[in-house]
Amino acid sequence: MAGTPVVLLFDFDRTIIDDDSDRWVVTEMGLTSLFNKLRSTLPWNSLMDGMMKELHSRGQTAEDITECLKRTPMDPCIVAAIKAAHALGCDLRVISDANQFFIETILKHHGLLGCFSRIYTNPSFVDEDGRLRIFPFHDLNSSPHGCKLCHATMCKGQVIDEIQASVSGNSTKNFIYLGDGHGDYCPTLKLGGSDYVMPRKNYPLWKRISCEPLLVKAKVHEWSTGEELKRILLYLIDTITIQDNIGKHQSV
Ligand SMILES: [Mg+2]
Ligand SMILES: [Zn+2]
């Protein structure tokens, strides 16, 4: 069903997967004490890049990291929701402060990578020595994003601005933004009255929206479990699609 006017924007950690991918790899691969020791001394991306350097020096390969990532918990209802939304013709994108290698590995493992048209995240690759390298999305020195709401590593609101500019053509698009964290608040404020935000209940984004609900123009639909996410998301896609069809008939 081509032409569905719905753009789905997903945070990754604790939204698509039920954990934080950085935390998962650090814990599962025995890096916790080194991570805690260096945490206050380095920017987040440099810290994670350093963790990957440590794994490499211990003889652990990118394949070992891949195997670890494959065990990250993901609710089967969320896998089903993503596949269903893609089958309905929605444009699905990930906006995440994790990194390309972690996200692509996990999505691929669940057969979901092909469902997403773009992934906006910190770039990463395996270098010639077999070490996984992680770099910042915004260059912290040459082009800091300057947003006071967001951490230095990524302003998701700036990403939303770019997406809104790139998809706004002759047909109206409706955005549904799904997230849980502090970093998802800035993009939430960028959404308009015909958009939706789905914050994970009792997580930081939900709490922030609940404190000052009038600041958010988008309609708010909270969720707790993967089953709820799937049910609400598919209901919203259905609602937007029906309204879009009515609008098209009225304008003929
Ligand atoms: Mg998150
Ligand atoms: Zn921001």
Image: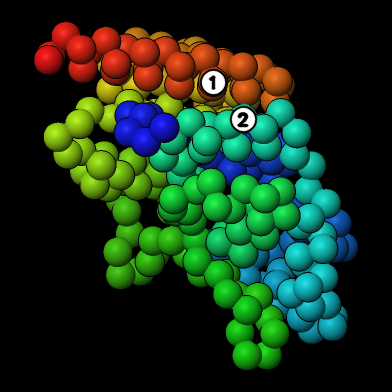
* In the image, residue 158 above or below residue 88: below
Ranked by sequence position, the earlier of labels 1 and 2 is 2
Disc 2: which residue: 81
- Check the picture and name the quadrant holding the C terminus: top left
Q: Nearer the viewer, residue 105 or 249?
A: 249
Give the structural element (helix, strand or loop) at label 1.
Answer: helix
The Cα atoms of the two marked residues, 1 and 2, are separated by 7 Å
Q: Nearer the viewer, residue 104 or 146?
A: 104
Q: Nearer the viewer, residue 126 or 188?
A: 126
* In the image, residue 232 above or below residue 48: above
Amino acid type, callout 2: Ala
The reply to whether callout 1 and callout 2 are in contact (CB within 8 Å) is: yes
Q: Is residue 123 left or right of residue 169?
A: right
Q: Residue at x 82, y 60 (%)?
A: 68
Amino acid type, callout 1: Leu
Which quadrant of the structure image shows residue 134? bottom right
Give the structural element (helix, strand or loop) at label 2.
Answer: helix
Q: Residue at x 69, y 64 (%)?
A: 38
Disc 1: which residue: 234
